[in-house]
Amino acid sequence: MKQIEIPYEKDRSRRYRLFEILPGALSWLILTAPLGLSFINRTLGVFFIITYLLVWFIKSIGLNVRSIQGYRSLERHKKLAWGIMLADLKRGEPTTDITASIPKWHADNVARLNAHENPIPVDDLYHAIVIASYNESIEILEPTVQAVMDSDFDMKQVILVMAYEERNGAQSEPAVQEIVKKYGKLFKHAIASKHPVTPGEVKGKGGNITYAGRELEKYVLQQDIDPLHVIVTTLDADNRPHKHYLNALSYVYAMTDSPRHVSFQPIPMFTNNIWDVPAPMRVIATGNSFWNIILALRPHMLRNFSSHAQSLATLIDTDYWSVRTIVEDGHQFWRTYFRYDGNHVVYPLYLPIYQDAVLAPTLPKTIKMQFVQIRRWAYGASDIAYVADKGFFSKNKVPRWDLWAKFLRLLDGHVNWASAPLMLALAAFVPSLLDQENFAAIQLPLIASRIQTIALTGIFITLFLSLKTLPPRPERYRRHRTVFMVLQWVLLPLTTIAFNSMAALVAQTRLMFARYFDEFDVTTKTVITDDNKKIT
């Protein structure tokens, strides 16, 4: 098999290091450009800043439209009768009762599947749910398993894989063993996978779920099950899939012409404990949820994130996930992309996987953990060097136009992540600080304010939609808590700069100076039960 693993630090060439430096260098260049250009020529600096603001104004309009479209798609797919539709695929005949829950396109899909030369029999599909844990207790893990069991899907077609770590005393082992003993018989099979400490691996999720995947492979081959008929979904310990998720995934998988070359991405939504977290974390969690909804409508930009699914055959072909990075989820897209010479896409599933927002025992710790979580996500900038190395400087058959398009989108996304919030908030003031007699420089903050005011009307769209997606208010909170859910959005500019932009800058700057993250920073999350008990 071709080499698709990330090179060790000692094996990274100067060229590889150049591309590790690239995103941070571009981010800092953009951030200093208003100052540098204004020193050279005030008018040039003003022109650059206005152009930048107008580009983002146009982008903001597109994002607002996508938010509405994405929300509608999400709500529509949650109401579809996926169980009935999947049964129709099995018998090869669509139901005649066409309602809002049975869309018109379903009959076309049944006909297309009947005409397929070598379809995967729906009855032969199995799901493997890999739940990764590190130090979670039974109170955290059991609701996740229960959410899987509450799916409107036959659990005898589901293999449960509880993946936990040997390191630091295997703190999750008692909980995992209890779950397997208590619920194992309700599934087709249950596996408790204990990942040993392994030299050459970062201390992260990738090594854990890779080891679990190999344990799953052994069982599947022993049972003489075709790995292409096994759909593997990875979940974190706090992830709760929507009740229709397994049926919908089965349906889309069965309709896929070449499932070996496809990843499936549901929508992560950080709403499990949204009523309990402080206001800044609620804004960040809601913003992240809607960004995931927007991405689902842009398949050309969609990548594996958090919970995702692939066939076991694909995972075997890619030797599972990377064990050398802390961002194994997004990186898995690129492993698969280069393993199949560019013949790999991500299909969105417009159904949520509900997750916890960041909440630690104290507010200072919560703020720190939120920054750490986003910094870890932003460390996906490390994929830029990987893509350049495997795409441009290693032998492959990836179409050049597709490679360039994906590489530039990847680079653009990470650079904007780090630079855009700061530029939009502060750049307009730079020329006037340098020259208070230049008319264009003096007028720039006012012009920027007008542009930003119009653009910020999109907050009201997100605010309205966020209230629509909230879970029911817990009885322990009074109605005024809902008022705070509205007022919290005044914090958006602050949270965007203090967390998103700064976290991305820190991640990219560390990458510039080869200060690699070699350990997965576990995010502290606390759940408050109905009787006000806190579980961290």
Image (tube, rainbow, N blue to C red):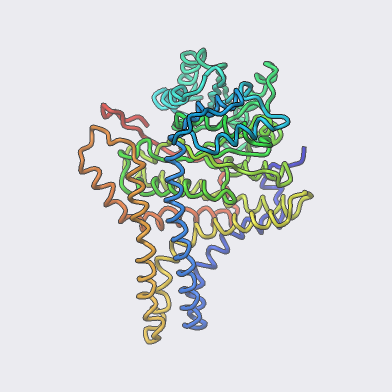
- Left/right placement of residue 127 relative to residue 139 reads right
The reply to whether residue 427 is in sight is yes
Residue at image coords 48%, 29%: 97
In depth, the one of 529 and 289 nearer the eye is: 289
Corner quadrant of residue 64: bottom left
Residue at image coords 39%, 79%: 432
Vertical placement of 58 versus 127: above or below? below
Corner quadrant of residue 259: top right
Residue at image coords 47%, 75%: 35
- Left/right placement of residue 513 relative to residue 137 reads right
Residue 78 at what x, y percent from top left? 44, 36
Residue 279 at what x, y percent from top left? 31, 47
Residue at image coords 46%, 53%: 66
In depth, the one of 379 and 337 nearer the eye is: 337
The reply to whether residue 167 is in sight is no
In depth, the one of 116 and 222 nearer the eye is: 116
